[in-house]
Image (spheres, rainbow, N blue to C red):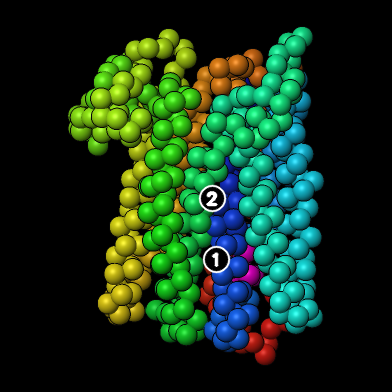
């Protein structure tokens, strides 16, 4: 057994589970802010009940996110001592900012949001969810700062075998930050929108709180449509051009460009083969990849032939996860576009099969976010800090494979229990539905 590979699997497990709750809570909080704003300004009981109900779902999800997030940072010291020693001075700074500024802001105001309802003025209570929303977004910002720096490192020098920070602004605003930040925030917003749309559809089909369901479904469908289109353009376009410019090995792998060429084609379909990396039964459209990468159909795009084999990421995994993510993204555009058309025609509440499809689609944006994360992290390999520190040099040397495997088994069992408990709580809450206003206290 390889302790480095096992350590990578352990980190993938812990952050992958945590990211489920981050995706749902961060995506939901912006819609919750919209619902609470409408409840405050219109004083409509349906919006009021929607705010209380989805607020309860958000708080539960946030709590599970905190629990599953606690363990992650400890792994940098236990399993990745080489990385911590080499790059900790730079990498730890945005993580410290996230914990001391953003998470603190978010945690304080979520308490006010939970316990301040009916005790504070409506405006003050609305301000608390605004601060929670901003705190959650700022928290994501600092995490993406740290991860973006690992993909496009800048603002440092290497002295005595360690990375030393010399320009914090370049660490924060690395070349990949804004494309990754907007792409990620928009992706989780789609997850929140389709979650709300699916739950609202369930309420309507069960003839439960139909006034609430009509309002929240309209909000979710329209928001999801706008976010899905933005994810393709401009945010997807920004991300593609950034990767082509700064991480050509990743770009060549996700697009299966075997040879450097001008007028490079884009892949519509193909079955990846790992060694050597290539596609079979592939269908390609000429010039589109060059246009996507550099906005010029005749531009040259570097292929996998330009790099040593040990500098390329795992081809099949990177290619497959990326294209599954893109395929789901196109599905979200089609789903929300059709939903918007049905809303415009006044047919959506008579189209039962579409409401059922919205319910079935609830987990798909979460899966898409997981696929995008795998593409990003696997596509950076064999580097932890791209072009600077390799994964094999970042792992702890004193942790045995058996110890890591034991921790993976224990974590897997623990996270299985946590996920079952979370799903049970959420499903129970949805089946129970919004409570009458005169029966509600806080949550």
Using the rendered view, name the quadrant where residue 40 is placed: bottom right
As measured in the structure, the alpha-carbon distance from the residue carrying label 1 to the one carrying label 2 is: 13 Å
Membership of 58 in magenta stretch? yes
Query: Is 355 in front, or is 47?
Result: 47
- Residue 2 visible (yes or no): no
Residue at 46%, 40% (x, y): give it.
Answer: 372
Q: Residue furthest bottom?
A: 438
Does dot 1 land on a helix, a strand or a loop? helix
Does residue 420 sit above or below 236 in this rendering?
A: below
In the picture, the disc for residue 31 is 1
State the image coordinates of residue 78 (x, y, percent, origin top left): 74, 27
Does residue 405 sit above or below 202 in this rendering?
A: above
Does residue 319 sit above or below 417 in this rendering?
A: above
State the image coordinates of residue 327 (x, y, percent, origin top left): 33, 45
Q: Main secondary structure of the magenta part?
A: helix
- Residue 165 visible (yes or no): yes
Using the rendered view, name the quadrant where residue 11 is placed: top right
Query: Is 156 in front, or is 162?
Result: 156
Residue at 65%, 41% (x, y): give it.
Answer: 143
Q: Could you tell me which quadrant the C terminus lies in?
A: bottom right
**Label 1 vs 2, first from the N-terminus:** 1
Using the rendered view, name the quadrant where residue 280 is placed: top left
Q: Could you tell me which quadrant the N terminus lies in?
A: top right
Tell me where the magenta segment starts and ends, as one range. 54-59
Assess whether mark 2 and mark 1 are in contact (beta carbons under 8 angstroms): no
**How many numbered markers are drawn?**
2
Residue at 31%, 75% (x, y): give it.
Answer: 344
In the picture, the disc for residue 417 is none
State the image coordinates of residue 442 (x, y, percent, origin top left): 72, 77
Q: Which residue is mark 2?
A: 185
């Amino acid at each position: 057994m390889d302790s480095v590979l096992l350590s990578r699997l352990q980190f993938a497990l812990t952050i992958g589970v945590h990211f489920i709750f981050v995706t749902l809570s961060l995506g939901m909080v912006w819609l919750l802010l919209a619902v609470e704003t409408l409840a405050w300004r219109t004083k409509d009981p349906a919006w009021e009940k929607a705010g209380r109900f989805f607020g309860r779902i958000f708080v539960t999800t946030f709590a599970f996110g905190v629990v599953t997030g606690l363990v992650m940072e400890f792994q940098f010291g236990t399993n990745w001592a080489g990385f911590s020693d080499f790059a900790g001075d730079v990498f730890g700074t945005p993580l410290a900012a996230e914990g001391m500024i953003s998470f603190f802001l978010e945690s304080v105001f979520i308490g006010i949001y939970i316990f301040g309802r009916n005790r504070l003025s409506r405006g003050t209570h609305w301000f608390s969810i605004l601060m929670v929303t901003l705190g959650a977004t700022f928290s994501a910002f600092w995490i993406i700062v740290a991860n973006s720096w690992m993909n496009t490192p800048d603002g440092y020098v290497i002295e005595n075998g360690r990375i030393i920070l010399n320009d914090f602004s370049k660490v924060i605003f690395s070349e990949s930050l804004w494309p990754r930040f907007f792409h990620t925030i928009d992706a989780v917003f789609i997850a929140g929108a389709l979650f709300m749309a699916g739950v609202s559809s369930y309420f309507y089909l069960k003839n439960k709180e139909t006034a609430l369901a009509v309002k929240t479904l309209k909000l979710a469908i329209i928001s999801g449509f706008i976010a899905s289109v933005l994810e393709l353009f401009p945010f997807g376009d920004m991300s593609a051009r950034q990767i082509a410019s700064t991480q050509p090995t990743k770009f060549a792998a996700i697009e299966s460009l075997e040879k450097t060429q001008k007028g490079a084609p884009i892949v519509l379909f193909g079955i990846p083969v790992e060694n050597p990396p290539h596609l079979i039964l592939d269908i390609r459209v000429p010039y589109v990849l060059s246009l996507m990468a550099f906005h010029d159909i005749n531009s040259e795009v570097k292929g996998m032939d330009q790099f040593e084999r040990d500098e390329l990421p795992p081809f099949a995994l990177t290619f497959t996860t990326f294209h599954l993510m893109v395929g789901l993204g196109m599905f979200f555009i089609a789903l929300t576009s059709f939903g918007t058309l049905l809303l415009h025609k006044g047919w959506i509440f008579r189209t039962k099969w579409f409401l059922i499809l919205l319910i079935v689609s609830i987990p798909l944006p979460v899966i898409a976010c997981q696929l995008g994360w795998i593409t990003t992290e696997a596509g950076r390999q064999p580097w932890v800090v791209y072009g600077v520190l390799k994964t094999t040099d970042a792992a702890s040397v004193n942790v045995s494979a058996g110890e890591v495997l034991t921790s993976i088994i224990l974590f897997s069992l623990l996270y299985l229990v946590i996920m079952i408990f979370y799903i049970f709580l959420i499903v129970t809450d949805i089946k129970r539905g919004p409570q009458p206003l005169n029966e509600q206290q806080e949550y």
